[in-house]
Amino acid sequence: MTAKKTASGLAGFFTKPKTFVAGAILGLVVATVVVTRFFLPAKEVVHEVETLSPSVVFERVVAQNELVCASQNYAIVDKATDTARLFDLIDLPWTTNSFWYRYCGTIKAGVNLQTAEFSQDEGGANKLTVTLDQPYVISNTPDMSKSGVLEERNNIFNNIDVSDVDAFQRQCIERSEQEVVDGGLYNEARANAEANLKAMFAAALGDQAELTVVFREA
């Protein structure tokens, strides 16, 4: 009795072609996934590396327009006086006023990359030269939270005017920029400009690139 049931069951299975085909397809898919995942070697992912030429690197550097290379904070404290004059010839001593003023700010020096020039030694592909103008003051920004009048001595015959304060501030700006020259900030800017450019070219081209930075005569 059992043998007959088994035989009739197998006969029923083979008499259902749709079920048989579906099972065969499923088995084929599973076998393909297993073989692909565990037995076939994985494909290597190839990353294309962008090759940069020295001239392309230089163009990208120039696109930055200017390069800030050095900065310093300053605080100028000084006394300003003003005396009325008779016919612009004689000082009137009883008309003298004065005020102490503190002027603070930050001055930044850098180089103009728009005027930079690039050359490459024909005998050595890795010998590069960048020529720059001398550093200049890129910005001189006052810190008005720290600047202002410290003490004033007004005069009823010659009141302190806003124009007097404005004139003194202009003198402080000129003085701060002169101190940049005297204090060697431009020397620091030249050294930092050279170091920064060499670092940029080395990062793009590798350590084999020999970059020389030349500054034009003022």
Image (spheres, rainbow, N blue to C red):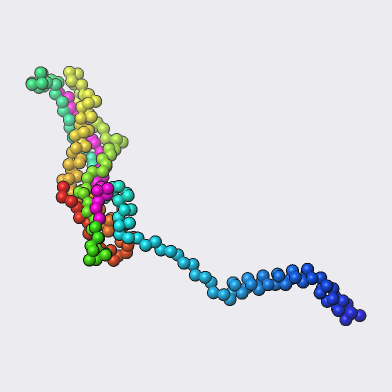
Task: Find the residue positioned furthest to the left.
Answer: 89
Please name the predominant secondary structure of the magenta segment in the image: strand
Tell me residue 169's x, y (percent).
22, 33
| Pick the front one: 69 or 154 | 69
Q: Is residue 188 visible?
A: no
Q: Is residue 49 left or right of residue 209?
A: right
Tell me residue 26's x, y (percent).
70, 69
- Magenta residue span: 96-118
Tell me residue 150's x, y (percent).
24, 32
Image quadrant where residue 172 sits: top left
Whether the magenta-drawn stretch holds residue 51 is answered as no
Q: Is residue 156 above or below residue 120?
A: above
| Pick the front one: 111 or 157 | 111
Q: Residue at x 18, y 38 (%)?
A: 175
Q: Is residue 113 above or below residue 13?
A: above
Q: Is residue 18 left or right of residue 174?
A: right
| Pick the front one: 179 or 47 | 47
Q: Residue at x 37, y 62 (%)?
A: 51
Q: Is residue 213 visible?
A: yes
Image quadrant where residue 35 sits: bottom right
Quadrant of the image containing the N terminus:
bottom right
Q: Residue at x 39, y 61 (%)?
A: 50
Q: Is residue 3 above or below residue 59?
A: below
Tell me residue 48's x, y (percent).
43, 64
Q: Residue at x 17, y 41 (%)?
A: 178
Label total for image: 0
| Pick the front one: 135 or 17 | 17
Q: Is residue 77 above or below residue 191?
A: above
Q: Is residue 41 left or right of residue 121?
A: right
Q: Is residue 13 left or right of residue 214?
A: right
